[in-house]
Structure formats: C-alpha cells, structure tokens
Amino acid sequence: MYNMTENGARLIQLRGEKSREEVASANKISVSALTMYELGQRNPRDEVKISLASYYGVHVSDIFFPN
C-alpha cells in the first residue's frame, strides 16, 4: 500500500545532513514542494520520483513502493 507519510520519512532519512535547499535545487523543485513530500502532505509527480531516486542513488521503488 502506498503510504505518503512513510515515503516522506524515507526521503528525510535519505537527505541526511543535506539541506532542503540543496536537494530541491539539484532536483529542480521548490523547497516547499520537497517539504510537503517529506511531511507526507503531497505526492511527487513520477518525473520527480525518478529524479529524487537518481539523486539519492536508489531505485524509485526503494523510496515510494517498498515491499
């Protein structure tokens, strides 16, 4: 089952010590969009999912569709 809150927690974990500004800029999204993704308040478009996964060096399914 798709759980935006759990996906957000994974995004926060992957971001680690990087700032939201750094991650948002690298993925060509706004800081507010990244914040909403991390808080589980918004679901990223598919192209953003792909970009974030590539940025973090993981598969899209590792972040957004585990198990």
Image: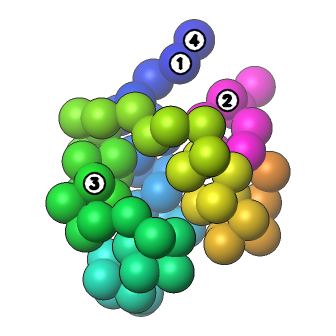
**Amino acid type of disc 4?**
Met
**39 displayed left or right of 52:** left
Q: Could you classify mark 3 by the number of other residues whose Cα lies within 10 Å: few (under 14), some (14-19), or many (20 or more)?
A: some
Residue position marked by numbered label 3 in the rendering:
33
Closer to the chain start, of discs 3 and 2, is 3
Residue 16, image x and y in percent?
A: 46, 79
Name the residue located 39 percent from the left edge and 73 percent from the top edge: 24
Residue at image location 62% in from the left, 46% down from the top: 47
- Residue type at mark 2 is Phe
Instruction: Tell me the CA gap for discs 3 and 2.
Output: 20 Å
Q: Residue at x 28, y 54 (%)?
A: 33
Residue type at numbered disc 3:
Ala
Residue that label 4 marks: 1
What are the residue bounds of the magenta stretch?
Answer: 60-67
The tag earlier along the polypeptide, 1 or 2, is: 1
Q: Are marks 3 and 2 in contact (CB under 8 Å)?
A: no
Element under label 4? loop
Q: Quadrant of residue 55?
A: bottom right
Work out whether 34 lies above or below 31.
above
Above or below, 41 against 52 in this view is above
Q: Are marks 1 and 2 in contact (CB under 8 Å)?
A: yes
Residue 32, placed above or below residue 55: above
Mark 2, Cα crowd under 10 Å, few <14 / some 14-19 / many 20+, is few
Q: Classify residue 50 as left or right of residue 11.
A: right
Q: Are marks 1 and 4 in contact (CB under 8 Å)?
A: yes
* Residue at numbered disc 1: 2
Residue 16 visible in the snapshot: no
**Residue beneath disc 2:** 65
